[in-house]
Amino acid sequence: MTDVLIVGGGPAGLSAALFTQKNGLETTVFDTDDTWIHKAHLFNYPGIGSQDGSAYLETLRTQVDSFGVERRQQEVTDVTTADDGFAVTTDEGEYKGTYLVLATGADRDLADSLGCAFDDSLVDVDLSMETSVDDAYAAGAMVRAEEWQSIISAGDGAAAALNILSKERGEHYHDFDVPADAAATFGPDEE
């Protein structure tokens, strides 16, 4: 059993994974590497002058890997509620977790099978990206009509992660680091 199960390894899913794992919640990401970011070239993402989408994705993967996120290259075929959380099914087995983040781009089939409410064809979420199913979140293109952009998706993933962290801590949680935090995490050269 893990704390957070994330289905989707694009900007939304990896952003959620970064925040949850970095802040002490064991996180597993399931990914098929079939993300639209591979077709993008970013020059409208703050902090990035110009970068190929695939190169950006590799940077994200390296970052989440450095915090110990478990990434599995497996297609998720089903998600269900389970005792105290959720079960994710792949061809290689079933995985259980307390929280679920769906970040599968425009593919909303898993959200539908889980019983999430929809607003027209979009997964209906609140401002924290939580769906109508308690502790299940949706982020990125699945909650937006044709507003598919990597920084928006990453922000959606971060919002979901911060809400999960707030629930776990029992108070509003803020992920705000200072130079000393970087030095403690990565060594004094990063301060």
Image (cartoon, rainbow, N blue to C red):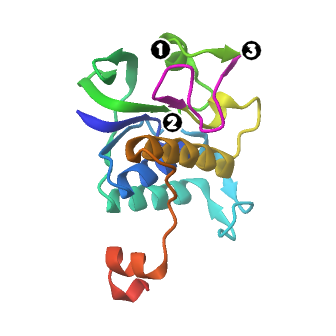
Residue 93 shown left or right of residue 57 in the figure? left
Label 3 to label 2: alpha-carbon separation: 25 Å
The amino acid beneath tag 3 is: Asp
The amino acid beneath tag 2 is: Asp
Residue 114 got which mark?
1
Residue 34 got which mark?
2
Residue at (52% x, 66% y) in the render: 176
Q: Is residue 27 above or below residue 113?
A: below
Q: Give the range drawn in magenta.
A: 121-137
Residue 120 got which mark?
3
The N terminus appears in which quarter of the rendering? top left
Crowd band around label 2 with a 10 angstrom C-alpha radius: few (<14), some (14–19), many (20+): few
Spot occupied by residue 163 in the image (x, y as percentages of width and height): 51, 42
Our reading of the magenta stretch's main secondary structure is loop
Residue at (50% x, 20% y) in the render: 133
Crowd band around label 1 with a 10 angstrom C-alpha radius: few (<14), some (14–19), many (20+): some
Dot 1 or dot 2: first in sequence order is 2
Label 1 to label 2: alpha-carbon separation: 22 Å
Spot occupied by residue 14 in the image (x, y as percentages of width and height): 47, 48
| Label 1: element kind | helix
Dot 3 or dot 1: first in sequence order is 1
Spot occupied by residue 27 in the image (x, y as percentages of width and height): 33, 44
Residue at (57% x, 45% y) in the render: 159
Residue at (42% x, 61% y) in the render: 63
Residue 106 shown left or right of residue 44 in the figure? left
Dot 3 or dot 2: first in sequence order is 2
- Which one is closest to the eye, mark 3 or mark 2? 3
